[in-house]
Image: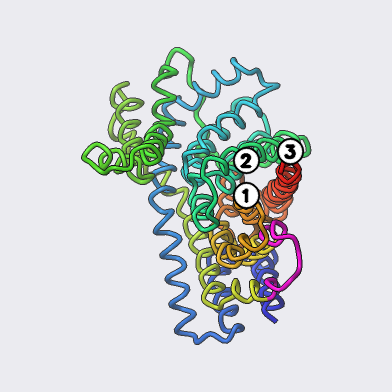
Amino acid sequence: MTFIILLFAIVLLILLITWAKLNTFLSFIIVSVLCGLAYGMNITVVTAALQKGIGDTMGSLLVIIGLGAMLGKIVADTGAAQKIASSLVNAFGRRYLVWALVLTAFIIGIPLFYNVGFFLIVPLIITISYKYKIPAVYIGLPALAAMSVTHGYLPPHPSPTALVTQYHANMGITLLYGFMIAIPAILIAGPLFALTLKKYTAKPLAIFASKDIPPEQLPGMAVSLLSAFLPVLLITLDTVIRLTIKEEDIFTTIIHGIGDPAIAMTLTVLFALYSLGLRRGIKVKDLENMITAAVKDIAPILFIIGGAGSLKEVLTEAGVSSKIADALQNMHVHPLLAAWGIAAIIRVCLGSATVAGLTTAGIIAPMIAVSGVNPNLMVLATGAGSLMFSHVNDGGFWLFKEYFNLSIKDTIKTWSLMESIVSVVGLIGVFILNYFITLSH
């Protein structure tokens, strides 16, 4: 019954948005309430879950999304995005532009949370799309595949890091194995899959496309890169310090402070306002208009993501993940496949990769000592499963849909399929590594 209710909820949500043309946020609220009642929850518990889901989701994302939109707009309107885009095209040529963006996304995706990386790379993708008349999905999805892989597979991202601890794995070895699996996953789900995406020609959000500015009026390359990617430097520095220096003193406290994603983004926006704006003679009023326009345009996206959070919380309160776990725990399958499968099903049902990974860890961890399976590979199998088939209950699905201006159908055929490829290739990679590791012993 748990799965039937969940299936009806997802189908109803899609029908309300696509067929009934109902506002997406309102559709989420209606489906969340009906879903909670169908699972036997009291109406007051349902409404509390709605508020908690929206609050938790927006609490973790609002600052990043808002500041990311501001930074993206400043970088676009001041010509910094155009400068970076032109330099990438000159360096790699249009033929290898996808590879350049994938490499860029992979590098910034290692230290950055996915949402931070998304708002740094997407304005650049949109600028390149408009300037060189290249379909945004074709050049954008491979880059986002690279960041998705780092989010699900590699420490220091939250879920892989927590899984390393719970599975008693080795951080360094997990990272090494993770790179070995991440590269083929990115290549297949990114540039190779992108060969099928040229037909998706929808125009992305024009608000983040830079105006065509004469080359002599563009900012310098160094200041453009620094303004766009300063969060990468600050968060990477914090990550390195956390891994290498365990003692707390004034220096490490300051680094941890400026390396916090919200603080790093705030400092970057302030730096961009000065370096790309005031320093180059742009008026304060014009900079204020850029920020206002950015916030105005992302308001609908914020509501959609909040709605997705409400549905996720109702499903969590209803105990859907534990019911799935109970149903799967006694199945006699290989531990690596069990870890992947449980994480994948919870991910599809709840929408959160982090929840899927951490829920799976509680079920799978006791199996490791008994089965003798490599704990580092268990981390990667769980991480791969947690990325499986992102759809309407995942905030990332809606971010991609809205920014790239796609229909739900096309978002499933592009974004959801890409995430599924990443997940399945990861599982295959884990079993290949397991074969050679077992052989060597």
Task: Name which of mark 1 and mark 2 comes first in the sequence.
Answer: 2
Pointer 3 residue:
188
Depth check, mark 3 against mark 2: the one in front is 2
Foreground residue among 235 and 161: 161
Question: In this rendering, is residue 144 above or below 18?
Answer: above
Q: Residues within 10 Å of mark 2 (few under 14, many from 20)?
A: some
- Marks 3 and 1: CB-CB under 8 Å? no
Query: Along the horizontal axis of the image, is 396 left or right of 429?
Result: left
Pointer 2 residue:
177
Question: In this rendering, is residue 226 above or below 175?
Answer: above
- Marks 1 and 2: CB-CB under 8 Å? yes
Give me the C-alpha separation between circle 3 and circle 2: 18 Å
How far across and down, in percent of the image, does residue 264 sit?
A: 35, 40
Pointer 1 residue:
380
How far across and down, in percent of the image, does residue 298 sit?
A: 47, 50
For numbered disc 3, what is the local secondary structure? Answer: helix
Report the magenta stretch's main SS: helix
The outermost residue toward the left is 250
Give me the C-alpha separation between circle 3 and circle 1: 17 Å
Magenta residues, as a range?
A: 327-340
For numbered disc 2, what is the local secondary structure? Answer: helix
Q: Residue at x 53, y 46 (%)?
A: 170
How far across and down, in percent of the image, does residue 51 sit?
A: 43, 71
Magenta segment: does it hold 262? Answer: no
The outermost residue toward the front is 441
Amino acid type indicated by mark 3? Ile
Amino acid type indicated by mark 2? Tyr
